[in-house]
Image (cartoon, rainbow, N blue to C red):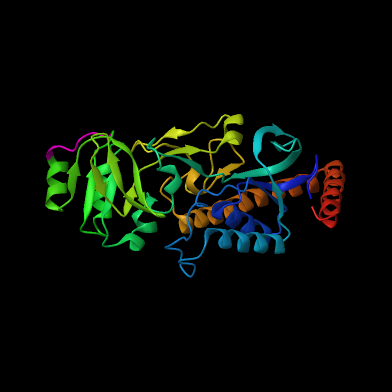
């Protein structure tokens, strides 16, 4: 349960693999943690996740459910909602939620992820995560040796096509709104036996509950079993914007991300990011790992702060009394399940 004025060591924004992994490490470090989760994971449309050692083929929701149980076992708290704002307050951060309540944290871990902005092609969004895909490492095995198309929308489309070629010999690059390949790129595609079809896509064709092809504005339909696209990444970072942290355009033109150091520390002291906010190409396993890395850095930062306060209290009797009162209040909060 949460209410205005509750103080946590860390508020984690986002309850996906990165946020839950961070919350788990922090809970095991005996830190009080609140996870603010909107319940909208990026990979929700996918029936299965892949490439996660020991969890290959598991449903994304099952991983999150198990993670929430584990975090709860170490005292982690959850609230359903969005973190809309944050401001410096009392040596930490006041975080405003869309529920109307405010919670206080000594440190923030923001792992809200990204939203995939899909190409504006009729019928495409409805098949996202099923047979409209983006990552060959996540989905390539499931569509191997079948006719696959790559819908070009930007400068990385040839790169994407060359990667999907590893999983099938029947591959077509649809130029759509992207630049037509020329020079060395055209030669690479030809050398790998990748067909190039020019013309803008007008919509998708289906047969029953599966993709059958892409219809061009010319009326021609290209038969396909799967279609690869490159969505534009839009960060879910309202809290960071409120603190003055703005997204950085990705050099590959695939969206924007939050600049951070190797541990996820942003330009704002006390604020870390993890998962796709910091790395647009991170899969589930890499996102979980980044949450763990950030959590260890956060705990180390809190230890340094705790030590500084303890030394100050030892040197100053009045500070010792204040520190004792603070510890008493914190322990009282924890006895009440906070």
What residue occupies the far front of the structure in this picture?
A: 208
Say which residue appears at 20% left-offset and 37% top-offset.
198
- State left or right for residue 261 relative to residue 315: left
Residue 216, image quadrant: top left
Q: Give the camera-side residue of 280 and 92.
A: 280
- Residue 104 in the image: x percent, y percent? 74, 40
Say which residue appears at 60% left-offset and 47% top-offset.
14
Q: Can residue 205 be spotted in the picture? A: yes
Residue 106 counted in the magenta span:
no
- Residue 299 in the image: x percent, y percent? 63, 53
Q: Give the camera-side residue of 288 and 329.
A: 288
Magenta highlight range: 178-183
Say which residue appears at 68% left-offset and 32% top-offset.
88
Residue 179 counted in the magenta span:
yes
Say which residue appears at 48% left-offset and 33% top-offset.
247
- Residue 5 in the image: x percent, y percent? 81, 40
Q: Give the camera-side residue of 35 and 328.
A: 35
């Amino acid at each position: 349960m949460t209410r205005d004025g509750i103080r946590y060591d860390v508020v984690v924004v986002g309850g996906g693999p990165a946020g839950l992994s961070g919350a788990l490490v922090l809970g095991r470090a005996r830190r009080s943690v609140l996870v603010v989760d909107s319940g909208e994971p990026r990979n929700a449309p996918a029936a299965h996740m892949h490439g996660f050692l020991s969890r290959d083929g598991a449903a994304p929701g099952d991983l999150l459910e198990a993670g929430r149980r584990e975090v709860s076992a170490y005292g982690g708290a959850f609230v359903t909602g969005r973190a809309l704002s944050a401001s410096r307050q009392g040596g930490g951060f006041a975080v405003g939620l869309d529920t109307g309540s405010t919670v206080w944290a000594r440190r923030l871990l923001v792992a809200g992820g990204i939203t995939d902005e899909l190409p504006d092609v009729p019928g495409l969004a409805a098949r996202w995560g099923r047979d409209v895909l983006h990552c060959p490492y996540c989905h390539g095995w499931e569509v191997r040796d079948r006719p696959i198309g790559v819908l070009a929308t930007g400068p990385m489309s040839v790169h994407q096509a060359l990667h999907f070629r590893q999983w099938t010999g029947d591959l077509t690059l649809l130029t759509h709104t992207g630049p037509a390949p020329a020079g060395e790129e055209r030669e690479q595609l030809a050398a790998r036996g990748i067909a190039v079809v020019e013309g803008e896509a007008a919509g998708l064709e289906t047969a029953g509950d599966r993709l059958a092809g892409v219809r061009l504005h010319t009326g021609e339909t290209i038969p396909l079993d799967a279609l690869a696209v490159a969505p534009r990444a839009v960060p879910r970072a309202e809290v960071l914007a409120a603190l003055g942290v703005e997204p950085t355009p990705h050099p590959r033109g695939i969206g924007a991300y939050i600049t951070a150091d190797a541990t996820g520390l942003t330009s704002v002291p006390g604020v870390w990011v993890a998962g796709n906010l910091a790395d647009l190409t991170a899969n589930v396993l890499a996102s979980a790992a980044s949450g763990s890395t950030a959590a260890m850095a956060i705990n180390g930062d809190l230890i340094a702060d705790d030590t500084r306060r303890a030394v100050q209290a030892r040197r100053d009797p009045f500070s010792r009394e204040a520190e004792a009162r603070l510890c008493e209040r914190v322990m009282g909060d924890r006895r009440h399940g906070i």
